[in-house]
């Protein structure tokens, strides 16, 4: 498989019009592994023209044909999982096993929306008069601008591409510049699956310039973003000025409530392994641990033991549990959060420093902090790093109050063997998603999304296609 490293516009692989390119850095070695184009305004205008013409053709394609194309995309991805996983690990850093898992999850989205494409329903309303026929139909919203981050570069773009194609929309995807090539693989998958030219376009380059240029264009009808709260606020302002439909999955700071009746050893192991998945660079990662006072010591002991057993290394090594952070910015942010917490009284139970085993690369030890409190930044700022702060709560009411004391509302987790506690805690968490006795809650068939500053709208599930359609009412006088 040849790794794509050009933009995909109107069914063709193209460089930037001025020839500008940017290096892709391997976070394990800090070496450049490839380059991709830096789009110009002229390139974006070509993509906009392409996505406009692509939509006008694709919306006329019947649902069964769209469904079949989506199924072929899923098959193409699964057939090349090893090659794409190697690309992802090289540019993003995550362990190769996690890269495989992400790619297969991305394929699931095309499978799921292959079915949803054939289940976009309208309805007939029996109104006041038999002389009228009242119809409601759902139609594709139009060309989409989609912006995806670097932490799950293939999965998060697929959550946008798959429902857009299923609904009959065209799309321009702007991947994060740190890890763009798996998105270019998606463009290749769409091309080889028979998706017509212009329906799927992928551009690379500077995020701020590209986002503004695309969003202010009258061609774009819908915007979808997965990113930080700060970026979301900027995008939302642009969309408000243009009166454009928008869905956003933004930051998270997921609380975990561990009740004294839980299986403590199992809960601690699950939490430790889940926390450090993708080096903690997961929007729904368990990131604030609240443990009932009577079982705090047992939980911390097991959590620490599991953390210390995790192998840090280059993601391409199959023995690696934790790869490098994605870039130098995340490494510095990790150190800043630890320094702030320790300065305010937190104790480092294990880890706490850059890994000394590597001369190069953005490696940091998985870190456990105890004696943390709400004065510390790590309890309020989305950490996106391999640091686990653990503290206590007294009972359900206290636990919910602490868990909900944040501007985020993406995911939350509960560990208990009591059905009543599970229901009350799940209902009481101010989050869009809740996991009970597990941290692996994302899949193609569920509605993924949050509340408060974690955004709005849902990706996946039967709800996932709604954001890519508009409702039209027709009144016919016979």
Image: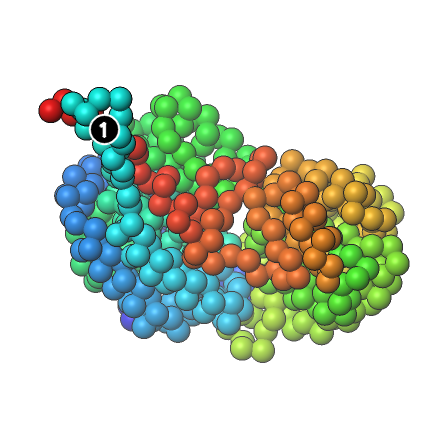
In depth, the one of 352 and 196 nearer the eye is 196
In this picture the colour scheme is: rainbow
Q: Measuring 23% from the left and 28% from the top, which residue is drawn there?
A: 134
Please identify the quarter of the rendering in which residue 242 is found.
Answer: top left
Give left or right: position of 248 versus 45.
right
**Disc count in the image?**
1
Is residue 188 shown to the viewer in this render? Answer: no
Residue most extreme to the bottom: 319
Residue lying at the far left of the rendered structure = 478
Quadrant of the frame with the C terminus: top left
Provide residue 358's location: percent of width, then percent of height.
64, 69
The kind of secondary structure element at disc 1 is: strand
Nearer to the camera, 162 or 176: 162
User: Is residue 266 in view?
Assistant: yes
Question: Measured from the top left, where is residue 62 in percent x and y?
Answer: 17, 49
x and y percent of residue 228 in the render?
A: 54, 41
In the image, taking residue 156 as reference, residue 16 lies left or right, namely: left
Q: Residue at x 47, y 53 (%)?
A: 446
185 in relation to 207, above or below: below
- Using the image as rendered, state which of residue 311 and residue 374 is in the foreground: 374
Q: Answer above or below: position of 466 versus 104.
A: above
- Residue at (42% x, 27% y) in the render: 238
Mark 1 neighbour class, 10 Å CA radius: few under 14, some 14 to 19, many 20 or more: some
Asked where in the image residue 32 lies, by quadrant, the reply is bottom left
238 up-or-down from 355: above or below:
above
Task: Identify the residue at image location x=87%, y=55%.
Answer: 293
Locate residue 110, reporting x and y percent: 33, 58
Residue picked out by circle 1 = 134
Look at the image and tell me in which quarter the N terminus lies.
bottom left
């Amino acid at each position: 498989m040849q790794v794509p490293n050009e933009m995909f516009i109107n069914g063709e692989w193209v460089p930037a019009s001025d020839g500008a390119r940017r290096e892709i850095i391997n976070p394990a070695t800090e070496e450049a592994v490839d380059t991709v184009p830096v789009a110009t305004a002229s390139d974006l205008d070509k993509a906009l023209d392409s996505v406009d013409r692509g939509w006008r053709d694709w919306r006329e394609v019947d649902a069964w044909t769209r469904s079949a194309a989506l199924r072929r995309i899923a098959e193409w991805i699964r057939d090349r999982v090893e090659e794409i996983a190697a690309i992802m690990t090289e540019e993003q850093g995550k362990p190769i096993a996690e890269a495989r898992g992400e790619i297969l999850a991305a394929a699931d989205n095309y499978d799921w929306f292959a079915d949803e494409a054939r289940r976009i329903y309208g309805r007939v309303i029996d109104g006041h008069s038999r002389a009228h026929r009242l119809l409601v139909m759902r139609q594709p919203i139009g060309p989409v601008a989609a912006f995806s981050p670097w932490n799950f570069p293939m999965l998060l773009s697929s959550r946008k591409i798959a429902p857009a194609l299923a609904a009959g929309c065209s799309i321009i995807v702007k991947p994060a510049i740190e890890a763009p090539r798996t998105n270019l693989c998606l463009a290749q998958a769409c091309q080889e699956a028979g998706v017509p030219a212009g329906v799927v376009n992928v551009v690379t380059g500077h995020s701020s310039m590209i986002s503004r240029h695309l969003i202010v264009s009258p061609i774009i009808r819908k915007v979808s973003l997965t990113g930080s709260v700060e970026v979301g606020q900027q995008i939302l302002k642009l969309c408000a000025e243009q009166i454009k439909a928008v869905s956003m999955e933004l930051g998270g700071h997921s609380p975990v409530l561990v009740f004294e009746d839980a299986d403590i050893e199992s809960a601690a192991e699950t939490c430790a392994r889940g926390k450090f998945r993708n080096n903690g660079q997961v929007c729904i990662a368990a990131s604030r641990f609240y443990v009932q006072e009577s079982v705090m010591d047992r939980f911390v002991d097991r959590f620490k033991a599991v953390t210390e057993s995790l192998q840090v290394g280059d993601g391409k090594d199959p023995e690696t549990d934790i790869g490098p952070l994605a870039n130098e910015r995340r490494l510095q942010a990790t150190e800043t959060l630890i320094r702030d917490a320790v300065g305010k009284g937190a104790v480092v139970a294990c880890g706490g420093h850059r890994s000394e085993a590597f001369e190069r690369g953005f490696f940091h030890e998985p870190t456990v902090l105890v004696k943390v409190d709400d004065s510390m930044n790590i309890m309020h700022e989305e950490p996106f790093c391999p640091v686990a702060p653990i503290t206590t709560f007294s009972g359900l009411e206290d636990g919910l109050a602490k868990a909900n004391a944040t501007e985020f509302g993406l995911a939350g987790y509960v560990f208990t063997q009591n059905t009543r506690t599970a229901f009350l805690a799940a209902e009481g968490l101010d989050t869009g998603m809740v996991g009970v006795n597990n941290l692996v809650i994302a899949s193609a068939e569920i509605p993924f999304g949050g509340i408060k500053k974690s955004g709005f709208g849902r990706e996946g599930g039967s709800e996932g296609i709604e954001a890519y359609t508009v409702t039209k009412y027709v009144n016919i006088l016979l």
